Image (spheres, helix red, strand yellow):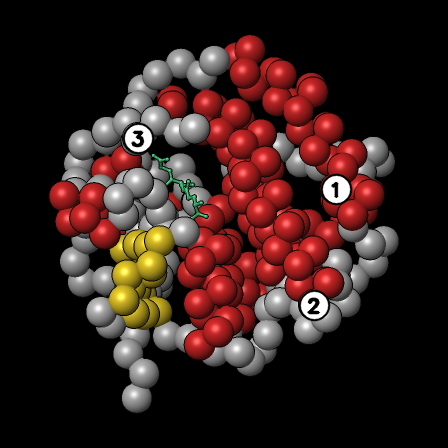
Amino acid sequence: MSMRLTVIGNYVSPYVRKALVCLELKGLDYEVDPIAPFVGNDEFSRLSPLRRIPVLIDGDLILNDSSVICQYLEDKHPTPSLYPVDVADRAKARWLEEYADTHLADVLIWRMFYQVAVRRHVFQEQADESIVQRARDVEIPAALDYLETQLPEDGFIFGALSIADISIACYFRTASFVRYVVDPARWPRTASLVERTLALPSFQKLARLEDAMLRIPLAQQRDALAAAGAPLTCETMGTLIAKHGLPRG
Ligand SMILES: N[C@@H](CCC(=O)N[C@@H](CS)C(=O)NCC(=O)O)C(=O)O
């Protein structure tokens, strides 16, 4: 009998969503400690040396980083496969995953979602409007121009759904929480791929939980998620105090 997996990480995080979608698609049983990384206790620092989410716990095994986690789930539970069979496509899928996790995360999450939502609601700070403005007007459009050259008109990038489609869609979902929507007239391929991917039952199931906790203060999110039927851990590594994370670079 396989043991229940544990994911540490908040449902609004795109990196956490990526891991949860893989768990859902592979039909694995899991529970979630839905903490924001900023409120993690000492045990969280021990399990996540960079104080980042997600963390996956599988028995004695602790894994950090969404890409490492998704690859582990694929290796341990190969069906359904979320990586293309063709070696070149597989490499290309990993590149698009990496592009999403680093650059899309930078422009959509750190320069927009983090500024507009996290700074305001978690740290009671003002957003730096010049960072948000530049992301919206310059950096996100440039990223979308690149994505348009990589994405198909219809279907998924490599035919069957893969980690590339999943990763890209995850960042746009979190950006939508601060009302960012891809303009379908200017970037039709990206807009439709994101829409198709977010419409999948695995994303929809998580979206119901995300919506249930989205505008709720951190301290009450666990109760809101429990009421919405989220598979929660019995114990939490969350505290009531938000601390800034380690410097990123
Ligand atoms: N490369 C990591 C990045 C994870 C990450 O940056 N997660 C964010 C949440 S969206 C986080 O924990 N941030 C806290 C911090 O950087 O202090 C992954 O793929 O899991």
Residue sitting at the far bottom:
1
Q: Is ligand 1 within 8 Å of the beta carbon of the residue shown at mark 2?
A: no
The secondary element bearing badge 2 is classed as helix
Q: Where is residue 68 in the image (x, y as percent from the top left)?
A: 44, 58
**Nearest to N terminus: mark 2 or mark 3:** 2
The kind of residue on which mark 2 rests is Val
Ligand 1 quadrant assignment: top left
Residue 196 visible here: yes
Residue drawn at x 22%, y 69% as measured from the top left = 60
Q: Position of residue 59 (x, y in %)?
A: 24, 72
Q: Where is residue 188 in the image (x, y as percent from the top left)?
A: 82, 43
Report the residue marked by disc 3: 246
The secondary element bearing badge 1 is classed as helix
Q: Which of marks 3 and 1 is in front?
A: 3
Report the residue marked by disc 2: 87
**Nearest to N terminus: mark 2 or mark 1:** 2
- Measured Cα–Cα span from mark 2 to mark 1: 21 Å
The secondary element bearing badge 3 is classed as loop
**Nearest to N terminus: mark 3 or mark 1:** 1
Quadrant of the image for the N terminus?
A: bottom left
Q: Which mark is residue 112?
A: none
Q: In which quarter of the image is residue 232?
A: bottom left
The kind of residue on which mark 3 rests is Leu
Q: Is ligand 1 within 8 Å of the beta carbon of the residue shown at mark 3?
A: yes
The kind of residue on which mark 1 rests is Leu
Q: Where is residue 110 in the image (x, y as percent from the top left)?
A: 49, 29
